[in-house]
Amino acid sequence: MTIFQKILDRQIPARSVAEDEHCLAFHDVNPQAPVHVLVIPKVAVRSLAEATDAGMLGQVMLMAARVARELGIEDSGYRVVLNTNGNAGQTVFHLHAHVLGGRVMTWPPG
Ligand code: AMP
């Protein structure tokens, strides 16, 4: 079981930001920006590479936009990232979107 499944099951705590029937959003424990929130679907899918449900992906994206709006980074700008497998640095194999904002982002990412 992944650590994100344990958060969904309330076995370990998380600093929740938003929740609906599809997704949970919570603060990243090791933030890389002033705002760094993770949005996870309630269904267990290992990564974007294994996702087949467009509706679920849409719900994750809509929740990411909602979080950005509610945390005040919509106008200043933000980045939504889905690290997928090894070279991208994915470490938790429950699909998740990083919502990063509150500072200027560089491009391309390192
Ligand atoms: P990734 O490297 O894309 O798989 O991202 C995993 C993210 O999960 C990292 O940014 C971690 O800091 C974060 N993380 C790991 N454990 C926890 C936790 N218990 N609560 C919140 N964030 C976590």
Image (cartoon, helix red, strand yellow):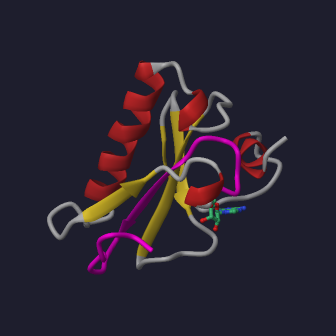
Residue positioned most to the left: 75
Q: Is residue 68 left or right of 22 when viewed as pictured?
A: left
Q: Is residue 106 above or below residue 26?
A: below
Q: Residue at x 61, y 32 (%)?
A: 42
In this view, the residue in front, 19 or 64, is 64
Quick one: quadrant of the N terminus? top right
Quick one: which residue is furthest to the front in this view?
87
Q: Is residue 3 left or right of residue 25?
A: right
Picture layout, residue 107 above or below residue 99: below
Dividing the image into 4 quarters, which one contains the C terminus? bottom left
Q: Quadrant of ligand 1?
A: bottom right
Percent coordinates x, y for residue 65 in the rendering: 30, 48
Within the magenta stretch, is there residue 78?
A: no
Q: Residue at x 25, y 66 (%)?
A: 73
Q: Is 52 left or right of 10, judged from the image as shown?
A: left
Magenta region: which residues?
90-110
Counting from the top left corner in percent of width and height, residue 11 is at 83, 48
The number of discs equals: 0
Give the quarter of the image for residue 43. Answer: top right
- At 46% from the left and 68% from the top, the residue drawn is 36
Please state which of residues 31 and 81 is positioned toward the viewer in this rendering: 81
Please, is residue 30 above or below residue 55 in the view? below
Q: Main secondary structure of the magenta part?
A: loop
- Asked if residue 16 shows in the view, the reply is no
| Spot occupied by residue 5 in the image (x, y as percentages of width and height) | 75, 41
The front one of 16 and 83 is 83
Residue at 68% x, 31% y is 44
Q: Is residue 94 visible?
A: yes
Q: Find out whether residue 94 is within the magenta segment.
A: yes
**What is the quadrant of residue 62 in the picture?**
top left
